C-alpha cells in the first residue's frame, strides 16, 4: 500500500510549508502551482500576489517586519521561470 504524498501547503501565519517546513512557496509547491496554473500565468501571478499580501499581514501580526523585497522575490520572483517564450513566425 503506497501512501499519497503530502501536499506542500502554507502554514499560516508563519507562511512555512506544512510538509517540508521551508518558506512557502517552497520548490515543490512552485512546481505544483506551475502545473496547476499551466497556461494561466496571470491567474497564478494574481493568486501569489494575494498570498504575498496575506503573508505581510500575518507576519506583521506576529510582530515580524518582513523585508518587502524578500517577500516579493519569494512569492513572485520565480514566476519568470515559468513563462513560456513567445514564438514568432518569421516568413
Image (cartoon, rainbow, N blue to C red):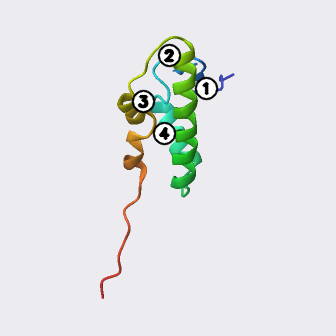
Which of the two labelled residues, at mark 1 and mark 2, occupies the earlier sequence position?
1
Residue 46 showing in the rendered view: yes
Which of the two labelled residues, at mark 4 and mark 2, occupies the earlier sequence position?
2
Neighbour tally class for label 4: few under 14, some 14-19, many 20 plus, Cα within 10 Å: few
In this picture, residue 11 sits left or right of residue 86: right
> CA–CA distance between discs 1 and 3?
27 Å
Residue 82 position, x and y percent, is 42, 49
What kind of element bears circle 4? helix
Residue 62 position, x and y percent, is 55, 12
> CA–CA distance between discs 1 and 4?
14 Å
Farthest left residue in view: 90
Q: Are marks 1 and 4 in contact (CB under 8 Å)?
A: no
Which of the two labelled residues, at mark 1 and mark 4, occupies the earlier sequence position?
1
> Which residue in the structure is indicated by mark 1?
5
Count of numbered badges drawn on the protein: 4
| Image disc number at residue 71 | 3
The answer to which quarter of the image holds residue 10 is top right
The answer to which quarter of the image holds residue 3 is top right
Nearest the viewer among 83 and 28 is 83
> Which residue in the structure is indicated by mark 4?
31
Which of the two labelled residues, at mark 2 and mark 3, occupies the earlier sequence position?
2
> CA–CA distance between discs 3 and 4?
18 Å
Farthest bottom residue in view: 91
Q: Is residue 48 above or below residue 25?
A: below
> CA–CA distance between discs 4 and 2?
16 Å
> Which residue in the structure is indicated by mark 2?
21
Amino acid at each position: 500500500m503506497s501512501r499519497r504524498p503530502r501536499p506542500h501547503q502554507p502554514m499560516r501565519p508563519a507562511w512555512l510549508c506544512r510538509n517540508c517546513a521551508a518558506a512557502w512557496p517552497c520548490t515543490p509547491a512552485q512546481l505544483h502551482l506551475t502545473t496547476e496554473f499551466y497556461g494561466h500565468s496571470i491567474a497564478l501571478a494574481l493568486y501569489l500576489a494575494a498570498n504575498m499580501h496575506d503573508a505581510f499581514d500575518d507576519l506583521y501580526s506576529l510582530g515580524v517586519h518582513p523585508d518587502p523585497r524578500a517577500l516579493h522575490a519569494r512569492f513572485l520572483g520565480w514566476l519568470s521561470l515559468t513563462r513560456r517564450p513567445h514564438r514568432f513566425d518569421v516568413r
